[in-house]
Image: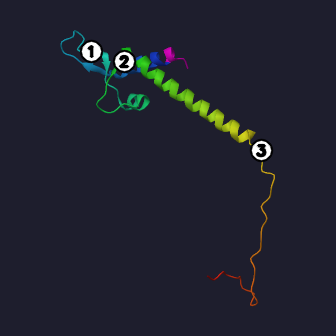
């Protein structure tokens, strides 16, 4: 999904949930530039409880999320490539049976 589409969905979500900052001095009663994020938006943007969002900063926050997702996707591609390109081991470990003493028990080293 493109960033512009995602920001449009976020704007619609904020509007439907009425997550605007209350401002009695404005005619509408809300400061529509400041978003009071709910649990879903806090999780998406990794915000602490005391942080708010501005409509002007949403695209900057989305850029961070997209960058992080791109790094994760590149990391997974590198890991997958490494696993696929790694040749299988060609040597087999030699298994040695324990040495037994005259009574038929495994010998232990005594120092």
Q: Residue at x 59, y 31 (%)?
A: 73
Position of the C terminus, as image quadrant, is bottom right
SS category of the residue bearing label 2: helix
76 on left or right of 40 = right
Q: Which mark is residue 15?
A: 2
**Do the CB atoms of the residues marked 1 and 3 lie less than 8 Å apart?**
no
The tag on residue 87 is 3
At x 45% / y 17%, what residue is drawn?
7
User: Is 8 rendered above or below residue 95?
Assistant: above
Question: Mark 1 or 2 closer to N-term?
Answer: 2
Taking depth in this image into account, of 78 and 100 the one nearest to the observer is 100
- Give the structural element (helix, strand or loop) at label 1: strand
The numbered dot on residue 31 is: 1
Say which quarter of the image contains residue 60.
top left
Residue 13, horizontal then vertical, whole percent: 41, 21
| Residue 2 on the magenta segment | yes
Q: Closer to the N terminus: mark 1 or mark 3?
A: 1
When the figure is inspected, residue 51 is found, relative to residue 59, above or below; the finding is below
Residue lying farthest to the left in this orientation: 25
The answer to whether residue 49 is left or right of residue 41 is left
Q: Residues within 10 Å of mark 2 (few under 14, many from 20)?
A: few
Residue found at the very far bottom of the displayed protein: 103
Q: Position of residue 48 (x, y in %)?
A: 33, 33
Range covered by the magenta-colored residues: 1-5
């Amino acid at each position: 999904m493109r960033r512009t589409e995602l920001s449009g969905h976020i704007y619609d979500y904020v509007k439907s949930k009425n997550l605007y900052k209350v401002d009695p001095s404005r005619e509408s009663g809300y400061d529509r530039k400041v978003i009071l994020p709910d649990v879903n938006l806090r999780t998406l943007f990794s915000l602490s409880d005391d942080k708010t969002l501005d409509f002007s900063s949403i695209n900057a926050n989305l850029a961070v999320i997209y960058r992080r997702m791109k790094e994760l996707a590149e990391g997974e591609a590198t890991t997958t490539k490494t696993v696929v390109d790694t040749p299988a081991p060609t040597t087999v470990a030699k298994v040695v049976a324990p040495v037994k003493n005259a009574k038929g028990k495994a010998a232990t080293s005594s120092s």
